[in-house]
Image (cartoon, grey):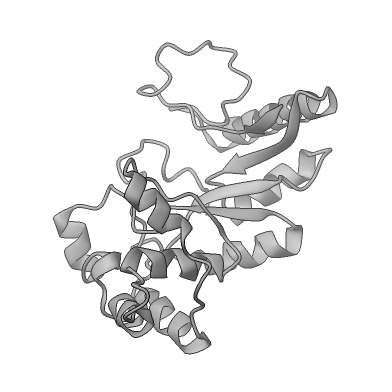
Amino acid sequence: EKEFGMSKGTKREHVDAEENDPWLYAKDGMGKEEITALRAETWRAMEDAYRQGKARSIAVSNFTIQHLELLKKSAKLWPPAVNQVECHPYYPQNELLEYCKREGIVVQAYASLGGQDGTKAKWKVLGGKLIESEPVLAVSKHLSNSQRTVSAAQVLLRWALQRNCAIVPKTSSPARMKENANVFGFVLTDEEMIDISKLANDLEGKKGRLCWRTEPLRLLEFE
């Protein structure tokens, strides 16, 4: 048993994939109506898998509010268990988090530390890397003492958790894995949460977005 989720299909990633792959929800060259229909068809296949006991839950990834609203119109099983999206202080997704909370959808945040797609030029526009930003470092310094060191990465992960996001930090380092898991022995104050959240104040729209920036399907949101 496992969780099934919709995945993007691109020429680059799925060049060898079967044409009738039931888990794709978007392909290069498709328009709004075609993609909306494909998402609905894919979700029906996932609903069938759930009913047949092949999956414990079904979910989506990178869905905006508009994506979810369109899917909701044709879905028989609702809500998706999870919506996995990019989410961090530069790209907080506030409206999406509120929507998912109302609908009973768990938000799983990836790139909580800023992701790996940022270029030097992009970081310069944003004011620097997240783990080097002033409010994050200030909280790290405030929480660290002779008995415990709280890293900037741990501060960012804790910020996400206190916004009720599940987190999936990526690392191949055993030491970092242990560090990333050790985020339950401290709490950020409301003031600290607000200070970190202010990093997005001067970023309009999707300027703070760091992932999928070169992905052909990144703008298929029809907003």
Position of residue 76 relative to residue 9, above or below, is below
Q: Nearer the viewer, residue 144 or 9?
A: 144
Q: Position of residue 8 (x, y in %)?
A: 50, 32
Q: Name the residue located 75 percent from the left edge and 46 percent from the top edge.
A: 72
The answer to which quarter of the image holds residue 74 is top right
Residue 89 makes an appearance in the image: no
Q: Nearer the viewer, residue 37 or 159?
A: 159
25 relative position to 46: left or right:
left
Q: Position of residue 52 (x, y in %)?
A: 83, 22
Q: Name the residue located 36 percent from the left edge and 59 percent from the top edge.
A: 113
Position of residue 27 relative to residue 192, above or below, is above
Residue 60 makes an appearance in the image: yes
Q: Name the residue located 40 percent from the left edge and 65 percent from the top edge.
A: 154
Q: Name the residue located 30 percent from the left edge and 41 percent from the top edge.
A: 214
Q: Nearer the viewer, residue 210 or 149?
A: 149
107 relative position to 155: left or right:
right
